[in-house]
Amino acid sequence: MTNTYLITIDNLSKAYGSTLAVQHFNLSVRAGEVVALLGRPRSGKSTILKVVGADLRPDEGFVYVCSFDTVLKAGMVRPRVGLVMHERILEPAMSGRENLEEQAMLRFFTAEESAQRIGELLPLSGLGARADDPLSAFAADEWARIEMVASLLHRPQVWILDEPARGCDAAGRERVWSAFRNLRPQVSSVLLAAQDEAEARALADRVVTVGT
């Protein structure tokens, strides 16, 4: 871990109409660091992650990812970030592998580059032969793991995960977190949201409470 900050959040505030989601939030995440945002539902965790991922504009404050402003330089931020959010981006009728190939194509990978990168990441997910089944047949933890792989295809520096194990039973959660640990070396810094304090502390170098 170094003293280089890949994420800097300075006095972030965001409201949805009259509802204040985040108020004057500050955080810095170093290169090599895993930080967990711990909080109850509607505590503002997802809002913070969306702003960091350049998917949402703050009302006040500034956010920098890899030294780029997420508003003014959103086009520079997005290729440097891998996102696993609540909104599913993959196609249920297609297999896991087909979805990954499509995501790689959207990133302008050649067929050879796509096959190589998918071959690097899939074994780390623990999905095995299930990767060739349609996503419509996937359990919650399997879907989470294929989304995690998809988010890393383009070799981002920063990985953002919004409660990837949500909806999973205890065994499924463990499979998700096992895949997380296997895949984590693919990136420099991680910012993840969690509701379970024990899980957050087991996964992260630092836990930051949100919405208190």
Image (cartoon, rainbow, N blue to C red):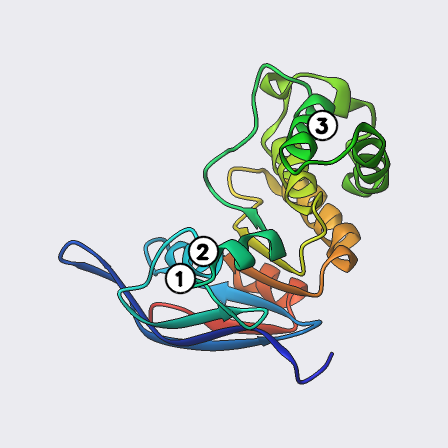
Which class describes the residues within 10 Å of circle 1: few (<14), some (14-19), or many (20+)?
some
Q: Locate residue 187: give its quadrant.
A: bottom right
Mark-to-mark CA distance, 1 and 2: 7 Å
Under circle 3, the secondary element is: helix
- The answer to whether 132 appears left or right of 144 in the picture is right
> Where residue 130 is drawn, which disc sits there?
none
Height in image: 206 above or below 128? below
Which class describes the residues within 10 Å of circle 3: few (<14), some (14-19), or many (20+)?
many
Q: Which circle, 1 or 2, is nearer the viewer? A: 1
Under circle 2, the secondary element is: loop
- The answer to whether 161 appears left or right of 113 in the picture is left
Residue at (43, 70) in percent of width and height: 63
Mark-to-mark CA distance, 3 and 2: 24 Å
Which comes sooner in the sequence, label 3 or label 1?
1
Under circle 1, the secondary element is: loop
Q: Which residue is mark 1?
A: 71
Task: Give amino acid for label 1.
Answer: Val
Q: Locate residue 203: give its quadrant.
A: bottom right
Q: Which residue is mark 3?
A: 101
Which class describes the residues within 10 Å of circle 2: few (<14), some (14-19), or many (20+)?
many
Residue at (13, 57) in percent of width and height: 18
> Where residue 54 is drawn, which disc sits there?
2
Residue at (83, 31) in percent of width and height: 115
Which comes sooner in the sequence, label 3 or label 2?
2
**Whole-percent x, y for residue 42 in the image:** 32, 55
Task: Give amino acid for label 3.
Answer: Glu
Which comes sooner in the sequence, label 1 or label 2?
2
